[in-house]
Amino acid sequence: MPARVVVYYVLALALFADSAYEEVMRQLVEGLSWESGWEREWKVPTKVAIYKARERLGREPLELLFRAVAVPLAGESTRGAFYRGLRLMSLDGSCLDVADTPSNEAEFGRPGSHRREGGGAFPQLRMVALAESGTHAVCDVAMGSYSTSEKELADRLIDGLSDGMLCLADRGFYGFKRFQTARKTGAQLLWRVACNVLLPREKQLSDGSFLTRIYPSQKDQRAKRAGVRARVVEYRLDDPALAEEEQRYRLITTILDPEQAPAKDLAALYPQRWELESVLAELKTHQRGPRVVLRSKHPDGVYQEAYGHLCTHYAIRRVMHDAALQADLVPHRLSFIRGLRAARRSARTQPGFFPPQHHRSAPEHDHRDPR
């Protein structure tokens, strides 16, 4: 099995997550025929052969592939992806169940459980993603063990921000140093902060927001040194079903001028952060399948499989974005399930690789184009 075929196979694992090893390969090559140039019948490798081929390939090619193709998709004509010229990006994290093997448990660990001695049923891979809110395209990701904090993983993604972006993040990610590091990228920030963060009201603004200063520590705040100017938007959700603490929202932003971004706009914009939760649901519930565990029994294979899922999700979202442009629709309003089904049909009828004797030069387009 050539390495490039194994790469396609790992991507196919993400499309057909509920199928057996050999069946995934059958799905991948179903569309091949004599007319495609094969000089002899191609037999499906055994499960052992496929396993060894994946082991030889390792995680690096899939990680490199993801990092080569995963860039923001939205252009000027993409609906719902920008606010006043700023590209909306979201930061959030989640966990994936992995196969319950000694090597996976040693590498990733597992969550605690009061119902089961030794912890949860499966070890878990933790990941934090940076995604384009309007297209659901995951543009960067950091992965680690279950014990690795989301904040630590988020620190690895800050460099993915740049001028012209507006990054949304939940209160779990706020920290003075992290906020300042993200600010230095040139991106604008709109992050929720916890209620126990002291934000002195220094200047009331016309839209109801106010200017404050944030500090590296409480000691610095008491001494009023090393403070950095920021703007705060406070509001409440009128929802009796939520606890008192959950009804109160405090957003901190680097956009200091209320004319540039009024408080009401920012309050209405913050829920866009939850688009990333929808992205993670697409990956975990629809593409991988509900309660489906990543099948790899060794950590390197787990990372390989996870990057395969991310590459496949990005490719589907790329096609959906192109379709949304043609129909003048908001990309994230299209059905991911329908897009996934279309991708599965395409994989069966139009295989993505060709026999070596029919190797063609790469088309003249951006090398990051997943097609």
Image (cartoon, rainbow, N blue to C red):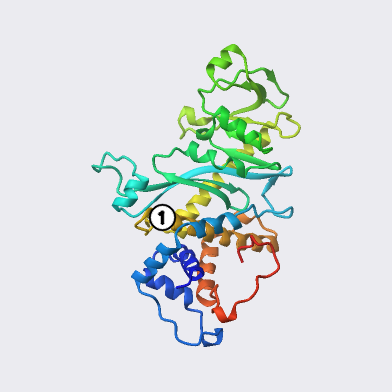
Residue at image point 48% right, 55% down: 283
| Label 1 sits on residue | 300
Q: Residues within 10 Å of mark 1 (few under 14, many from 20)?
A: some
Q: Position of residue 333 (x, y in %)?
A: 60, 55
Residue 19 shows up from this direction: no
Q: Position of residue 11 (x, y in %)?
A: 49, 64
Determine whether, in the image, residue 349 is placed left or right of residue 209. Answer: left
Taking the view exactly as shown, the residue that stands out farthest to the front is: 56
Locate the C terminus by quadrant: bottom right
Looking at the rendered structure, the kind of residue marked 1 is: Asp
Residue at image point 29% right, 40% down: 113
Q: How many marks?
A: 1
Determine whether, in the image, residue 343 is placed left or right of residue 302. Answer: right
Say what secondary structure mark 1 lies in.
Answer: helix
Q: Is residue 319 above or below residue 219?
A: below
Residue at image point 54% right, 41% down: 156
Closest to the observer, 316 or 106: 106
Residue 167 shows up from this direction: yes
Q: Position of residue 168 (x, y in %)?
A: 60, 39
Q: Is residue 82 above or below residue 24?
A: above
